[in-house]
Image: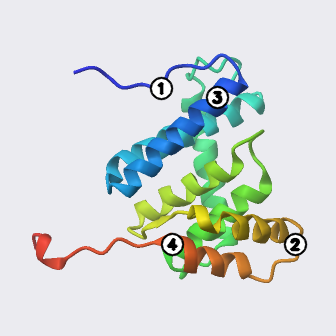
Amino acid sequence: MSERRIAPVADNREKQQTYKDQMRRYSKAMREEFFFEAILIDYAMLEDRLRSMLYHAALFANRDKAGCWKKTKPYFQAFVKQYLETRLNAECEPIDTAIELCLYTMKTQVFNDGNKRAAVIYANHYLIAHAGGLLVIPEKEVPDFKRLLVTYYEDKDQGEIKTFLKEKCWKRMEIDSRTIDP
């Protein structure tokens, strides 16, 4: 069985095209309810975004060598743990926590590009881990989302974007209890 891999890219233009292709695969997997494939695509893109951040933060001397990833991974785990402990209420529903993580990641602009994509992937990773569904911004809602996001970036938002994400972008998966073995 051959291993499917995303080919390495030579420049930023190729990287953007690769992300577009992967987002198309992700959207198709979600539409066709291949959720496991969607999770794998999410994971691969999130890992790439983290590697990029490490490289640009001078924690990787070479993007191809991930040896220092083992050394820096605990740093990220500690960072996320600290963020969760200090910024989020432990009694929040998973969707509220995921929205907080998503917006925080978008606003802090951790990466040179792809911050919104990485933030949604990050939030979905959290939601999947907590059986909380997925955040999916429908194409028809993108203009409203961008308008609300600008307001949020300018610190003028009074919670509208959180309500928007929860009401218009949160997809929950209904499971028929008869299909689950006790």
| Residue marked by disc 4 | 170
Assign a secondary structure to mark 4. strand
Check disc 2 and give the amino acid type. Asp
Name the mark nearer the viewer: 2 or 1. 1
Amino acid type indicated by mark 1: Ile
Residue depth check, mark 3 versus mark 2: number of the one nearer the observer? 3
Residue 123 occupies which quadrant of the picture?
Answer: bottom right
Secondary structure of the residue carrying numbered label 3? helix
Side of 146 relative to 48 (left or right):
right
Q: CA distance from mark 1 to mark 4?
A: 28 Å
Q: Which residue is mark 3?
A: 15
* 59 shown above or below 89: above
Label 4 close to label 2 by CB (< 8 Å):
no
Marks 2 and 1, Cα distance to the nearest angstrom? 38 Å
Quarter-wise, where is residue 176 in the image? Answer: bottom left
Residue at position x 64%, y 73% in the image: 88
The amino acid pointed to by label 4 is Trp
Q: Residue 41: horizontal and vertical position, in percent?
A: 45, 42
The numbered dot on residue 155 is: 2
Which sits earlier in the primary sequence, circle 4 or circle 2? Answer: 2
Mark 1, secondary structure of its residue: loop
Residue beneath disc 1: 6
Near mark 2 (Cα within 10 A), the count class, few <14, some 14-19 or many ≥20, is: few
Q: Is residue 166 visible?
A: yes
**Disc 4 residue crowd, few under 14, some 14–19, many 20+, Cα 10 Å:** some
Residue 122 left/right relative to 151? left
Residue drawn at 30 percent across, 75 percent down: 174
